[in-house]
Image: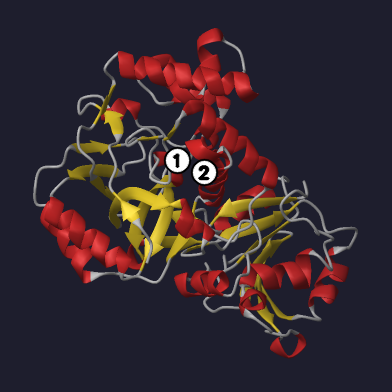
């Protein structure tokens, strides 16, 4: 019975929300960030990149304190206001392709995370967890929601549908041509319907934001160690989450690119592949797999289809059935010598929104020697991995939606 509660968000005034909203900090190049801040004094990037003001890159605890200062300045200048009443926030995105994402921003419990009522499918890196925990502790807010998913629920869908009949508090379109809508939901009866629906669910699943959720958990534990000052109802025992039904989740694959053939000639490499795959040369026609355990490959100006020889591979558990794991165990590690897919400089990734033609362009440009493509992982596979306590290889999923930062802010 996961606990999802409403909260009093700090958020931009209606007239400035489109100016404040930004993509995640890491998604911009330095040039792109500076370009946006040059022309837009209201961008949330000014808060998370405080060194811009001093024309200097600032890192570590000094940066955290400056982030806090910039945030307070936005509040003092009336760019941000805090809602007087706790609310859920109905958030809808219609992307450039017409796909609709619609869900609820609320606060999820770190206790549920600890007790595995909020399930994980990815490993986290300890030093990143600790660093972000210190960041949260210093700045006192979270502006990027963890993406959680739940089975489609008729009661929640009806509340969302009824709420969205009213004029949205926010409605703006980004330069990516995605349109964003937000409705604060404060009606007591509707809030109870939503809470009751989540109470009847056995678990939720993290789709995106494993480090954010784990860092929030560490922050709560740090406060708990303080003893008598620990307050179980305090805001730091929750983390801001965007909850969407499974049918609204879009999961894309990450294609793999490798810089060299690990000393093999092209012919030697194809012979080594033959132990695990039926190989067919597709020439210059771009190939995308149509079935699980089939892969596409681009090498030396030509596309290939690779069909796994199932007689030579054991499907012992849900992890071993994943195409990202199969590719790792049959090609990346044993043949190409990529043991550490998270840190090896010889491997690169391209999300599945950029197709194999994009992979081809990188190989043809000489940035890489070879590229591999596959089908995306399904929500059923993701849930099974989490249920069985396994973790996927890095870069197994590219999941949408991607929310904008600074639209709802959770303070603690």
Percent x, y of residue 72: 39, 18
> In this rendering, would 175 be left or right of 132?
left
Q: Is residue 94 visible?
A: no
Residue found farthest to the front: 228
Q: Within the image, what quadrant is residue 184 found in?
A: top left
Percent x, y of residue 85: 20, 37
The residues bearing labels 2 and 1 have C-alpha atoms spaced at a distance of 6 Å
- Name the residue located 49 percent from the left edge and 71 percent from the top edge: 383
> In this rendering, would 332 be left or right of 249?
right
Q: Nearer the viewer, residue 118 or 56?
A: 118
Q: Which residue is mark 2?
A: 220
Residue found farthest to the right: 263
- Name the residue located 42 percent from the left edge and 68 percent from the top edge: 203
Q: Quadrant of the N terminus?
A: bottom left
Percent x, y of residue 95: 32, 50
Q: How many marks?
A: 2
Q: Is residue 141 visible?
A: yes
> In this rendering, would 30 be left or right of 411?
right
Q: Which residue is mark 1?
A: 236
Whether residues under marks 2 and 1 lie with C-beta atoms below 8 angstroms apart, the answer is yes
Q: Which of the marked residues, 2 or 1, is nearer the chain's N terminus? A: 2
């Amino acid at each position: 019975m996961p606990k999802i509660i409403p909260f009093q968000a700090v958020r931009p005034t209606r007239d400035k929300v489109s100016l404040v909203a930004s993509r995640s900090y890491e998604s911009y190049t330095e040039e792109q960030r500076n370009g946006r801040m040059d022309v837009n004094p209201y961008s949330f990037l000014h808060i998370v990149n405080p060194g811009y003001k001093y024309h200097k890159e600032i890192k570590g605890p000094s940066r955290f304190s400056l982030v806090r200062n910039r945030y307070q300045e936005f509040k003092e200048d009336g760019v941000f206001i805090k809602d007087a009443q706790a609310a859920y926030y109905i958030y809808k995105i219609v992307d450039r392709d017409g796909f609709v994402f619609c869900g609820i921003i609320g606060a999820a419990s770190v206790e549920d995370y600890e007790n595995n009522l909020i399930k994980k499918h990815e490993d986290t890196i300890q030093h990143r967890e600790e660093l972000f925990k210190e960041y949260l502790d210093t700045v006192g807010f979270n502006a990027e929601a963890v993406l959680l998913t739940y089975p489609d629920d008729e009661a929640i869908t009806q509340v969302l549908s009824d709420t969205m009949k009213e004029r949205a508090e926010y409605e703006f379109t980004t330069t990516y041509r995605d349109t964003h809508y937000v409705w604060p939901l404060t009606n007591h009866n509707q809030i109870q319907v939503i809470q009751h629906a989540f109470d009847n669910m056995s678990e939720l699943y993290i789709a995106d934001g494993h480090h954010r959720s784990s860092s929030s958990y560490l922050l709560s534990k740090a406060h708990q160690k303080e003893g008598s000052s620990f307050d179980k109802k305090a805001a730091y025992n929750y983390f801001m989450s965007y909850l969407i039904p499974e049918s609204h989740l879009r999961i894309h694959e990450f294609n793999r690119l490798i810089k060299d053939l690990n000393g093999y000639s092209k012919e030697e490499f194809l012979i080594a592949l033959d132990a695990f795959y039926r190989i067919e040369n597709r020439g210059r026609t771009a190939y995308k797999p149509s079935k699980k355990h089939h892969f596409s490959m681009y090498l030396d100006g030509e596309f290939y289809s690779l069909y796994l020889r199932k007689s030579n591979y054991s499907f012992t558990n849900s992890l071993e059935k994943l195409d990202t794991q199969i590719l790792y165990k049959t090609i990346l590690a044993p043949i190409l010598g990529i043991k550490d897919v998270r840190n090896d400089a010889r491997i690169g990734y391209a999300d599945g929104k950029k197709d194999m033609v994009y992979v081809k362009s990188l190989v043809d440009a000489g940035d890489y020697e070879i590229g591999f493509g596959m089908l995306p992982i399904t929500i059923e596979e993701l849930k099974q991995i989490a249920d069985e306590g396994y973790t996927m290889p890095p870069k197994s999923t590219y999941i949408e939606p991607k929310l904008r930062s600074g639209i709802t802010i959770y303070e603690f």
